[in-house]
Image (cartoon, grey):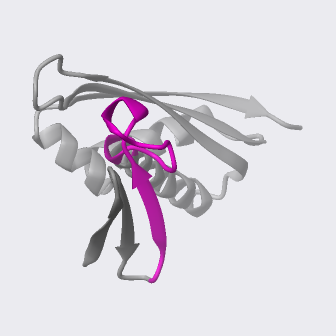
Amino acid sequence: MQTSVHWLENVAFEAKSESGHSIIMDGSPEYGGENRGPRPMEMILMGLGGCASFDIVTILKKSRQDVTSVECFIKADRADTIPAVFTKIHLHFVVKGNSVKEKQVSKAVELSAEKYCSASKMLADGGVNISHDFEIVELS
């Protein structure tokens, strides 16, 4: 896997993925940014949420759950010192569907957290305390 990051101006950068996608990242105005895109550390959280959500959707579909929506809401704490690494991250999943079984969602969240989500594993192995919970919204 490869990516490139190109400095645009001030503290704005364009990141290009190997798969041909690009995104603008920008620093906050207090550091000379113009708020043209997410901060790099926000991108890490977005990647974590995407990785975990991918796992959960895939696992639930394999277990024949009638899932219509999965949302992941992430809250994170960072160290007060430099480097301001993440110290705690909490992922809250909202799973919507018809007759979705709590046991299946719980298993999917657990498997993602402990086995499949590479981003979660990497951050946890780096000392970040990661927690998860979920709620199910019944549509039928």
Q: Position of residue 77 (x, y in %)?
A: 30, 21
- The quadrant of the picture occupied by the N terminus is bottom left
Q: Is residue 125 left or right of residue 7?
A: left
Tell me if residue 33 is in the magenta stretch: yes
Q: Nearer the viewer, residue 125 or 22?
A: 22
What is the magenta range?
20-42
- The quadrant of the picture occupied by the C terminus is top right
Q: Position of residue 35 (x, y in %)?
A: 50, 42
Q: Nearer the viewer, residue 78 or 122?
A: 78
Above or below for 2 versus 83: below
**Residue shown at 25% from the left, 78% from the top:** 2
**Residue shown at 36% from the left, 67% from the top:** 15
User: Is residue 121 visible from the viewing direction of this image?
Assistant: yes
Q: Name the outermost residue toward the top.
A: 80
Q: Position of residue 29 (x, y in %)?
A: 42, 34
Q: Position of residue 32 (x, y in %)?
A: 35, 39
Above or below for 118 versus 111: below
Above or below for 138 versus 107: above
Q: Is residue 105 left or right of residue 77?
A: right
Q: Nearer the viewer, residue 120 or 66?
A: 120
**Number of numbered labels in the structure image:** 0
User: Is residue 1 visible from the viewing direction of this image?
Assistant: no
**Residue shown at 22% from the left, 47% from the top:** 121
Query: Residue 132's quadrant in the figure?
Result: top left
